[in-house]
Amino acid sequence: MLLRHSALYLLARGLPGVVNFVAIAVFTRLLPPEEYGRYALVVAGVGFFNVVFFQWLRLSLLRFLPAYLENPSPLLGTILAGFTVEALLTGGLGLGLVLLWPDPTWRGLLLLAVPLLWAQAWFELNLELFRSKLQPLRYGVASGLKAVSALGMGAVLVLLGYGTYGLLVGLLFGMLLGGMILSRAEWVGVRFQAVRELVGQVLHYGLPLTATFALDFVVSSSDRFFVAYFLGEGPAGVYAAGYNVPWALITMLMMVVNSAAYPLAVRALENEGISAAQTQLIRNSTLLLMVSLPATAGIILLSTEIGSMMLGSPFREEGAPLIHWIALATFVAGIKTYHFDLAFQLGKYTMGQVWVTGAAALTNSVLNLFLIPKWGLVGAAWATLGAYGLALILSAYLGRKVFVISLDIRQTMKIALATLLMSIVLILFPPSEERFHLFLKVIVGITAYVASVLALNVRRVQSWLQRRQV
């Protein structure tokens, strides 16, 4: 079931992931760094408020819906009531910021950021609803509509001269389209209600995660604001573009596995108990490493060529050197988030994540303050890697005291060896900035990795293939 659902989510997330990847190449060629920097700062700010005010609702829905599948209306009604309260609160805060902000350009951007926040929160809430109900097809269609329409509308509006506003309006349009069309039937007949028992469960489980993900934002996105403060909006745009290239690809692959894997672990825990959930988590972690480790190694080895292809010329010189550092940081962050952090969520001690992420956020902020003035954009990347490295160690150590999560060491070593063999093959190819040469290296690298996985019989893949042939 894990492989089947992962394959479905690969399609569901693959197209939007590719479109988002293409959007980086398109937008860094249509906009100067200053305007792309404003866009990146608005998106990061919206992401922060989305995490603080709405993430706890999404995670609570994902965690508790499997227990209410026979009668989901009370839970959905409670979630809907919470969403409405948060929307009113953020609307008031947004209006206050618009009225108080001195810069007229940023006043307009903040005014647009409020509906963008609501649209993003609703869109992501419905994605988690589809995911919890094991509906990867609907998940994929919604994500695809959002990605394609945001890219198309954004590019058209930029070409018409609307700059940063054009990108944000395109994103707003994509969020509304993806969040409204397929989700309407899920909410028909659901009424606003606040079931006391459910409110208590949701608040106890979700609110600590609000602090966790707000602090995680400090690690993943606050560097853009530090760069803008020390170096300006233009360098912030260059940094965001260089950061987003590896982050988009590696995170997409890891989220594909997690989208299929986490609901299976929750159901195993609810229906069969702790031992079954732990077994499922080991399977999940092996598949997570199988897709993420070779992707990370490939991006690191091909970072120069990828930067030349993906980034526009104003972004390329300083943005490309960031790619291999951010690729490594993304991998470390993903292993923490999609494997070891699950101990706190399955063990219902989400406060533990607050301490882990708080330590990482403090480390990231201190490192940014010292490294950016001296080392510039690369210093910000080093700060991100250092913070995520600390968070991974803390999560693995403290999480075991809540809910024991392990790795299959034997399978992990096989995956590492297959990745090493792939890396040797890639190193033998001479560097080149020609796109065809890059595509050829990617195909050869994938072929070498798949052949190594088959030869090493990772996760008994040989037996699986034999059963499929029978």
Image (tube, grey):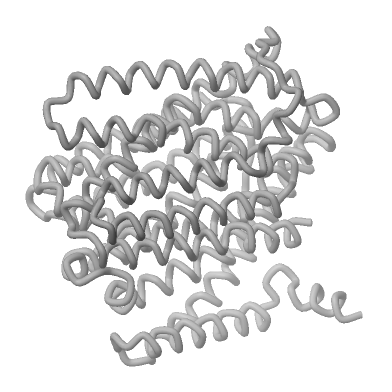
Q: Is residue 425 visible?
A: no
**Looking at the picture, does residue 35 appear above or below residue 124?**
below
At x 49% / y 23%, what residue is drawn? 208
- Residue 91 percent coordinates (x, y): 39, 21
Quadrant assignment, res 189: top right
Quarter that holds the N terminus: bottom right
Q: Quadrant of the C terminus?
A: bottom right
Q: Is residue 374 left or right of residue 12?
A: left
- Residue occupying the point 60% across, 82% down: 452
Closer to us: 78 or 277: 78
Eyeballing the image, is 352 above or below 467?
above
Q: How many marks?
A: 0
Indicate the position of residue 97 as horizontal and vertical percent values. Answer: 25, 22
Q: Is residue 199 above or below residue 385?
A: above
Please report the residue visible at 45 percent of the width from the left and 89 percent of the height from the top.
440
Instruction: Indicate left or right for 287 with 46 as reference.
Output: right
The answer to whether residue 196 is seen in the rendering is yes
**Closer to us: 285 or 53:** 53
Residue 294: horizontal and vertical position, in percent? Answer: 50, 71
Residue that protrudes farthest toward the top in the picture: 196
In the foreground, 57 or 329: 57
User: Looking at the image, which residue sits at the far front?
Assistant: 160
Question: Percent position (x, y) of residue 21?
Answer: 42, 64
Q: Is residue 176 above or below residue 92?
A: below
